[in-house]
Amino acid sequence: MKWTAIVMIAALTACNAPTASQPHQPQIEISDAWARPTPGGVDVAAGYLTITNHGANEDELVSASSPRAGSVMVHMTEMSGGMMSMHEAQGLAVPAGGTLTLRPNGAHIMFQQLTSPFTIGESVPVTLHFAHAGDVDTSLVVRQDAN
């Protein structure tokens, strides 16, 4: 019995399997997730965050959802002919071993048909849907600006 336990520990170590002292790091990590507060009567809001892909392969943010909005889209903001325009993105690449930052005046998450205004200090739940990593739950802290 003792030898069986030693053999199993050696096999796990040889395979470099995660142990209690070596936790598994998720492939997709979300940081600096935030949104601005919305004034009364406004039923749209934008969310921003940084996505880090710890995986060896590129992934893609394909969509998002939230119980706080009737519709959630991944949007791009672009300048064309001196005019700024927004449109739904058909997916945003997250490079292997790299990051994708969604920020004001760039790619962002667009919440439409809000169930209630976003207020400073609250957290807004969001599920990000990735092509390979699947669903990743996070929340956006509502604050006045990026600080």
Image (spheres, helix red, strand yellow):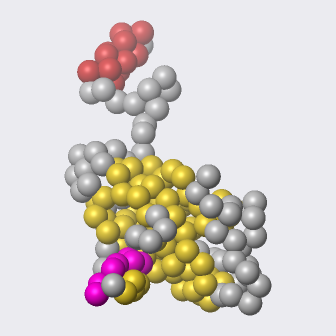
Q: Nearer the viewer, residue 31 or 125?
A: 31
Q: Residue at x 31, y 74 (%)?
A: 91
Instruction: Please tell me whether residue 13 belongs to the stretch shown in magenta.
Output: no
List x then y, in percent, for residue 78. Answer: 34, 78
Q: Locate the N terminus by quadrant.
A: top left
| Residue 140 in view of the camera | no
Q: Residue at x 42, y 45 (%)?
A: 26
List x then y, in percent, for residue 120. Answer: 75, 64
Q: Nearer the viewer, residue 101 or 10?
A: 101
Q: Quadrant of residue 112?
A: bottom right
Q: Nearer the viewer, residue 25 or 17?
A: 25
**In this rendering, is residue 99 above or below 5?**
below
| Residue 72 in view of the camera | yes
The outermost residue toward the top is: 2
Query: In the displayed structure, does residue 26 sit left or right of residue 126?
Result: left
Query: In the displayed structure, does residue 59 sit left or right of residue 38?
Result: left
Q: Quadrant of residue 60?
A: bottom left
**In this rendering, is residue 78 above or below 5?**
below
Range shown magenta: 75-81
Instruction: Please tell me whether residue 80 belongs to the stretch shown in magenta.
Output: yes
The outermost residue toward the front is: 82
Q: Residue at x 46, y 64 (%)?
A: 103
For the stretch drawn in magenta, what is the main secondary structure?
Answer: strand
Q: Residue at x 68, y 61 (%)?
A: 143
Q: Quadrant of residue 125?
A: bottom right
